[in-house]
Amino acid sequence: GETDVMEALAATRAHYRIDPLRIAVAGFSMGGGSTWHLATHFPGLWCAASPGAGFAETPIFTKAANSKEIRPAWEQTLWRQYEATGISGNLFNVPTLAYSGEIDGQKESADLMEAAMAKEGLKLERFIGPKTGHHYEPATKANLTNRLEELIATGRQAMPREIRFSTYTLRYPESAWVRIEGMEKHWERADVHTKFEADGTLFVETKNVSSLHFNFLSPVAPPAKVTIDGQTLEISGYDKPVLMLVKTNELWAQASKAPGLGKGPGLTGPVDDAFMDSFVFVRPTGKAFNPAVGTWVNNELTAACQLWRDVFRGEVPVIDDTALGAADIANKNLILWGDPASNRVLAKIVAKLPLQWDDKNLSFHGKTYATADHAPILIFPNPLNPRHYIVLNSGLDFRADGYGNNALQTPKLPDWAIVDLTSPPDNRWPGKIVDAGFFDEAWK
């Protein structure tokens, strides 16, 4: 859905004269949840935001916090990807008008965001429909609309002189002219606070950040001096109005480019991240090491195609492993189904993946499993094109449990998992998950 929004926005701007400084984001209920997400994760795009009802975090809204089932630690960590509460400070440059019906249960989202923003020193502007449930109260809606129109007329600054930005993943790396290119540890909060001092010095303060990119827009001139985390840098050698800073051994320095391939924008994991861009299912044409694995793969592939059709209203592109072409490798994330015996593409690259897999054993992360009844799920930079992903044996990893509410359609698995196939798939998992975790920033 997020990808659809961005593609629709780009298409609209291609056909109409849209002022990029006067684009607002607003919605109600499911659209309110979308607005909380889009406003906090893409704060550099909007002149204003107006979420109505909806939800802003996962465990309370979905009642997972009160469930008898204790959610795995990695699933709880992944809730941070879409939650707005933890990055509410990103609304520093996005005037936000929250609407709630006074007796609407979804008023809770604005209550939570108001408290989260207060901790960041921000005040949420609220509109509450008196004695109103899950809909807009007409008089309050008119007041809200007038205020929103004022903000749209004013527009946003192309180059705000001060930015506060936080993220848990470099799927969401930037606000306006500030972009995080590297984190010290994904899924812990990374923070950047930057502003221009009166003398033109750029002040920068960071947490959990290893690489930064600044794109200076007129009329602001690129700075000659930067103070970052208490360190002063004299800046020189601009050929474009951009600046890259990289931290090594706790010391910052000017750089000409970002560090080599590691986790960064567009290459972050988890498994579900592969489906935020163009992808293709690569179907095996050979026989698996073990019939049980072959059957499981076929069933999971079929279920993944059906889920995509049911929830995202599209047909998954599927090709045989014998039909994979250079254009697919160059432009798409490859979703490889099967094992090294059944899938020719996987057989070609398995030696360059962080596992060993033959007809007897599957070895990964210092442990060995029987190939007869175990299979890996994995996301990793594609050895044939490290700017894109390969994924082993998984489509989107929410299952039937997520059909009932889009708030449940969040990542369930981290970067890798080992599945015990002796336990059948259910509405939550593709089998028994015997181990799972994240790669580090170097994909180790």
Image (cartoon, rainbow, N blue to C red):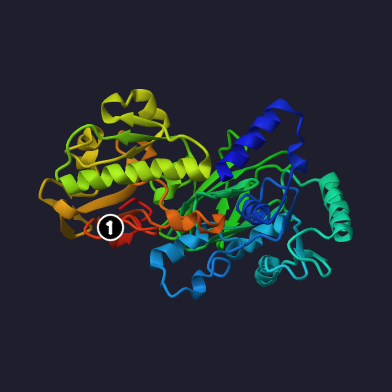
Which of the 4 image quarters holds residue 61?
bottom right
Q: Secondary structure at mark 1?
A: loop
Mark yes or no: residue 256 visible: no
Which of the 4 image quarters holds residue 195?
bottom right
Q: Is residue 73 above or below residue 238?
A: below
Q: Is residue 273 above or below residue 331?
A: below
Residue at 17 percent of width and 37 percent of height: 287
Q: Which residue is label 1 attached to?
A: 424
Q: Residues within 10 Å of mark 1 (few under 14, many from 20)?
A: few
How far across and down, in percent of the image, does residue 183 sit? 46, 55
Q: Is residue 329 left or right of residue 310?
A: left
Q: Is residue 21 left or right of residue 250?
A: right
Q: Nearer the viewer, residue 271 or 176?
A: 271
Q: Nearer the viewer, residue 330 or 419?
A: 419
How far across and down, in percent of the image, does residue 177 sit? 64, 45
Residue at 19 percent of width and 41 percent of height: 351
Numbered label tally: 1
How far across and down, in percent of the image, does residue 25 sit? 71, 48
Q: Is residue 440 left or right of residue 124?
A: left
Q: Nearer the viewer, residue 259 or 359?
A: 359
How far across and down, in percent of the image, does residue 5 sit? 62, 41
